[in-house]
Amino acid sequence: MHSHSLTAPHLVLALAALTSPLLACSDDAEESAGDDSTSVDTWLPTGGDTSPGATSTSGGTSTATATTGETSTATTTTGDTSADGEPLYLVATWVADDAGTNTYVAVVSDLTQDVDLSQALEVGGYGDAWVYDEWVFVADGESPFLTRYTVQDGALVQDVSLSFANYAVPSTAFFDNQILTRTKAYLANVTERRYVAWNPETMEITGTVPWPEIPLESSDLEPFHSYTDRGGEVVDGLFFHGIYQHNYDWNFFGSSSSIAVYDIATDQLVSLISVPCPMMDVMSVGNDGFLYVSGWSYMPLSAAFGLSPTNCAARIDIATRTVDPAWTFNFKDVTGGLEGMAVRVREGSEGTIAVFHGSGIPVEGATGIWDLDAGDNDWEIYGIDVSTRAITPSGTRMGSGSFYEAHLDDRYFVYLPGNDATQVYEYVDGAYVPRLSAPGWMSRLFRLP
């Protein structure tokens, strides 16, 4: 393994290309239930700190209960432990070199030590993994193939696999794959604009669910469903998923977005909520009965470049499935003129956002939006009180606004990818304290079951 610099804009664009309707496989495919297989491969922790495992994205756990109901990214309080009784965690990171990109997955027991990838499970390409109940799911990075593992005595034991090769999907990664319940999950098929439904318990494909049509503001725009690991939420038997409009170059976004709401039991679309903000790509369930929606790192740069006219956040009353118009705000209005992104609730009314300070490159001298994000410390984590929309700088700077989060037991972590490594911070007494770091672009941190 050779570490190689991969800037945040290029990695984000690579992910967009991987799942963009423009670049996804468009061949017609005959639908089938896929292929299952079973193996007995086992990975054991080594050195007390690390072991190969599986991959995961942005989030701490898979199931729990919020004040508004069940959600897919909440907190667990139990799990597997190492030989000395310490909890075990799953880390996944993408590492690039001149030959390409590989995914590395490690099991760790100490969140204060740097991640050693020498014993990690290696998956070619942009692989991924997710933890749900007692299962660990690993997505292949070079084919639409998914493998389930169980955790036995601190080891990941390969169980059964499922192929989606007949469904025109380029990947089974969990930025496009949402586990809704123990018996239902949706894999986004962006080519044909529908979900492929599958059963995590039986590892079978069960059908497809169409996406809604949305009116486009111009012929230059096309619809896109947000990435499920940050833009999909499960609450009270409903699945909320954002849809927004973008142009071919991904630097301009329509002025409004939609939130599709599905009844998980029936697979029926029950609401299509119009939100007066562009690129609603991030969702976060609050403890106050609201769902908070906002943009990802494209959005502040597009607005700063003068392409998209607004960059705002909104919240949705979950019970009535309506937007709270009094709460919607433009980031520049609360930050003193700076652009921001990614409203995420941490605990109670406390949340986090990323604020773009700029790298000093003037818009007039830039050839594209990513030229504006050329520095190592262009962004800063801010606190936000979601009840008042008041913000507080944290002093923690980062090279990209694309921060991930994890709720582990009663602890809150953010991980900030850089060019060559990702630094994980824990929020403690109002400050972000450095914890572990991992080579490459780390996008998953889970407590193992």
Image (spheres, grey):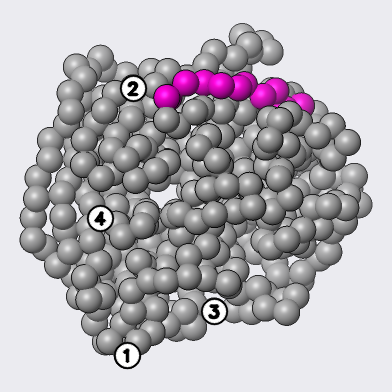
Residue pointed to by mark 4: 123
SS of the residue under disc 2: strand
Query: What is the distance, in whole Å, between disc 4 and disc 1 at their CAs?
Result: 29 Å
337 sits to left or right of 158: right
User: Closer to the observer: label 2 or label 3?
Assistant: 2
Callout 4: few (<14), some (14-19), or many (20+) C-alpha neighbours within 10 Å? many
Q: Which residues are magenta?
A: 266-278
Query: Which of the marked residues, 4 or 1, is nearer the chain's N terminus?
Result: 1
As rendered, which of 151 and 416 lies closer to the eye? 151
Query: What is the distance, in whole Å, between disc 3 and disc 4 at their CAs?
Result: 25 Å
SS of the residue under disc 1: loop
Q: Is 388 drawn above or below residue 29 in the view shown?
A: below
Residue pointed to by mark 1: 84
The amino acid at mark 4 is Val
Q: Is 337 drawn above or below residue 326 in the view shown?
A: below
Residue pointed to by mark 2: 208
User: Closer to the observer: label 4 or label 1?
Assistant: 1
* Residue at 26 percent of width and 28 percent of height: 206
* Residue at 80 percent of width and 28 percent of height: 309
Residue 83, given in percent of the width and then of the height, sits at 27, 87
Q: Is 165 drawn above or below residue 56 in the view shown?
A: above
The amino acid at mark 1 is Asp
Residues marked 4 and 1 touching at CB (< 8 Å): no
Residues marked 3 and 4 touching at CB (< 8 Å): no
Query: Which of the marked residues, 2 or 3, is nearer the chain's N terminus?
Result: 2
Residue pointed to by mark 3: 435
Q: Quadrant of the C terminus?
A: bottom left
